[in-house]
Image: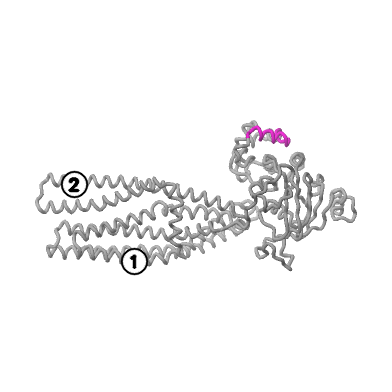
């Protein structure tokens, strides 16, 4: 599963190049600190030799002062390096998070349905956080410590070629061992990151459904699954940590061997009077100093195990591509849109590719759907649960592409319309309204700052909602102007279903779409609020094409056309008034049944 070096360099180039000046400052500070680390031991060795040779006190004080000054300067450079590296990491990881989030938002529903929200959060945030050291320290510190290691070995060669050769061979051996051990840890850390994503996905699911879980007494079941997930996670974590422990154990053992070699070599050379006592000290000191770059490289390699796993998963995420090709260049008219379905087949199963025929029609959610809705007309869409009504709405928004057939809006095939424009010209209101933790203004405009407060207030007034919203002072503030700045919670806390639904209607109205889809929009409302919603619907669909999906026949009395689905097929389509008077029509039977139930 090794990742080519090119992918590392590309990732660094993409997110460090915009910070080129800061990275250069970081490199200068780091390399200056390395130079001082190599210089300081030289002062200690010179100090020792000066003492043994009977040097003057003034000389010793000068050497000590320079040593202290260099040490202080080195600490300042260390602080500067830490500050710059953390800033570089923060900026790079934030930019990567933004790119990942934007990429995921562009993926189609096939990808989003295959993963839980918690897993997406872990993939976008968790994996990126693991890369913070990669951007700020990994490459620069590995390079810096490599230069420190090389500088120490050069100094040792200058002092005595035997010391330089011996410790060079030891350093190469140590790094080779650590690199060999590091390779075995990549796969366990990849499994750990994947298990982490699954765990957070599980947690996210349970938090979203906490009310249903408590109400139905399923808390114990959830806790059991929670413990089972943790138990399955623990062995994977142990495997990953064990691989990392091998690196730590190897480095400790290697450093012990290195110290023994340095002591023996220094004693041998000093006994043969090949070096001074100061140089003997330097050999031992530099050997100890060798442990620092080797240890840091070892730590970075340990981080590389997790980083490589995260980079692999991030690259995998970036390689995901939406099944929807956004190549459309034809704009839609600004008026009400016509809707045409011609022999449309659709299945959520990936095996049924576009244009592929199937003998098993049961695999298809929609089968051979054809109808024509002229601009300004309202279509009442009926059918049992699972008959394909919501799927039809999703196809109009192009959340999925049809497998066979053609869908046209405003006489333009929807795959020839830019997706952003298509979804701007088609507005949908469902029974489940998604609110954001933002102000009422932002919830109404979808964070579009170009829509003025005056336009928002005008829309609310047009829909007949101003007085109703003002009367809810507890939720929206003492006046509407103040209420627009009120922050709503994403879980609709403090809002009734009716209040949330009213916001959804105003939200769609502000889009000024040419086609409005109402998917069971008033099925969960009380009669009083439903009457208000009905008036809002009348104004919303005026001069617009509309598709009203409903179980209750009362909600489609304004429809011009009726379309009834059953198991993904059209069983009836026609003018509402004609079907209502035809005793042989399915719609007539439904009206009669509804009338009987109401009277009883």
Q: Secondary structure at mark 2?
A: helix
SS majority, magenta: helix
Say which of marks 1 and 2 sits in front: 1
Q: Is residue 456 left or right of residue 311?
A: right
Of the two numbered discs 1 and 2 on the same chain, state the one appearing first in sequence: 2
Which residue corresponds to the image point at 50% horizontal and 58% vertical from the top-left?
Answer: 315
In the displayed structure, does residue 168 sit left or right of residue 510? left
Q: Which mark is residue 156?
A: none
Q: CA distance from mark 1 to mark 2?
A: 38 Å
Image coordinates of residue 151 in percent, x first then y, are 26, 56
Can residue 142 be seen in this snapshot?
yes
Is any part of residue 529 visible from this angle?
A: no
Q: Which mark is residue 64?
A: 2
- Tell me the quarter of the picture where residue 9 sits: bottom left
x, y percentage for residue 575? 84, 50
Contact between marks 1 and 2 (CB within 8 A): the answer is no
Does the stretch in magenta take in 453? yes
* Disc 1 element: helix
Q: Nearer the viewer, residue 335 or 177?
A: 335
Label 1 crowd bin: few (<14), some (14–19), many (20+), radius 10 Å: few
């Amino acid at each position: 599963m090794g990742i080519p070096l090119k992918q590392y360099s590309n990732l660094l180039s993409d997110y460090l190049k915009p910070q080129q000046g800061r990275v250069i400052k970081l490199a200068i500070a780091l390399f200056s600190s390395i130079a001082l680390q190599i210089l300081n031991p030289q002062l200690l060795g010179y100090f020792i030799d000066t003492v043994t040779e009977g040097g003057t006190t003034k000389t010793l004080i000068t050497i000590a002062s320079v040593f202290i000054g260099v040490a202080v300067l080195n600490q300042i450079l260390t602080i500067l390096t830490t500050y710059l590296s953390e800033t570089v990491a923060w900026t790079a990881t934030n930019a990567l998070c933004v790119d990942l989030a934007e990429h995921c938002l562009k993926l189609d529903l096939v990808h989003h349905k295959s993963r839980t929200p918690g897993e997406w959060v872990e993939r976008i945030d968790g994996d990126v956080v693991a890369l913070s050291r990669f951007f700020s320290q990994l490459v620069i510190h590995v390079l810096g410590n490599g230069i420190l290691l090389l500088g120490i070995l050069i100094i040792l060669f200058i002092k005595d070629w035997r010391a330089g050769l011996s410790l060079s061979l030891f350093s190469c051996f140590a790094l080779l061992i650590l690199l060999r051990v590091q390779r075995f840890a990549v796969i366990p850390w990849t499994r750990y990151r994947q298990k982490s994503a699954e765990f957070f996905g599980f947690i996210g699911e349970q938090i979203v459904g906490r009310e249903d879980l408590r109400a139905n007494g399923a808390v114990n079941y959830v806790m059991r699954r929670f413990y089972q997930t943790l138990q399955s996670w623990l062995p994977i974590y142990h495997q990953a940590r064990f691989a990392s422990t091998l690196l730590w154990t190897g480095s400790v053992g290697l450093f012990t061997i290195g110290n023994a070699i340095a002591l023996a070599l220094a004693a041998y050379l000093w006994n043969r009077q090949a070096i001074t006592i100061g140089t003997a000290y330097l050999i031992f000191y530099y050997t100890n100093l060798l442990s620092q770059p080797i240890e840091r490289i070892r730590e970075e390699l340990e981080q590389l195990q997790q980083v490589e796993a995260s980079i692999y998963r991030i690259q995998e995420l970036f390689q995901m591509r939406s099944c929807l090709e956004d190549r459309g260049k034809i704009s839609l008219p600004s008026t009400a849109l016509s809707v045409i379905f011609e022999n449309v087949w659709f299945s959520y199963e990936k095996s049924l590719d576009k244009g592929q025929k199937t003998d098993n029609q049961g695999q298809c959610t929609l089968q051979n759907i054809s109808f024509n809705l002229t601009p300004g007309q309202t279509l009442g869409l009926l059918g049992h649960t699972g008959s394909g009504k919501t799927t039809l709405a999703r196809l109009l928004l192009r959340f999925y592409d049809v497998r066979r057939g053609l869908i046209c809006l405003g006489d333009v095939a929807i795959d020839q319309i830019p997706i952003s424009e298509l979804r701007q010209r088609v507005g949908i209101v469902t029974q489940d309204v998604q609110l954001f933790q933002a102000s009422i203004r932002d919830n109404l405009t979808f964070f579009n700052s170009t829509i003025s407060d005056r336009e928002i207030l005008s829309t609310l007034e047009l829909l007949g909602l101003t007085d109703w919203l003002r009367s809810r002072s507890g939720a929206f503030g003492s006046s509407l102007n103040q209420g627009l700045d009120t922050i709503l919670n994403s879980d609709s806390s403090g809002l009734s279903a009716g209040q949330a639904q009213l916001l959804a209607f105003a939200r769609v109205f502000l889009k000024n779409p040419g086609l409005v889809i109402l998917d069971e929009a008033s099925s969960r409302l009380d009669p009083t609020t439903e009457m208000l919603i009905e008036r809002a619907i009348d104004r919303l669909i005026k001069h617009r094409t509309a598709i009203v999906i409903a179980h209750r026949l009362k909600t489609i009395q304004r429809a011009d056309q009726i379309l009834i689905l059953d198991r993904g097929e059209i069983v009836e389509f026609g003018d509402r008034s004609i079907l209502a008077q035809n005793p042989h029509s399915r719609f007539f039977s439904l009206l009669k049944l509804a009338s009987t139930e109401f009277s009883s």
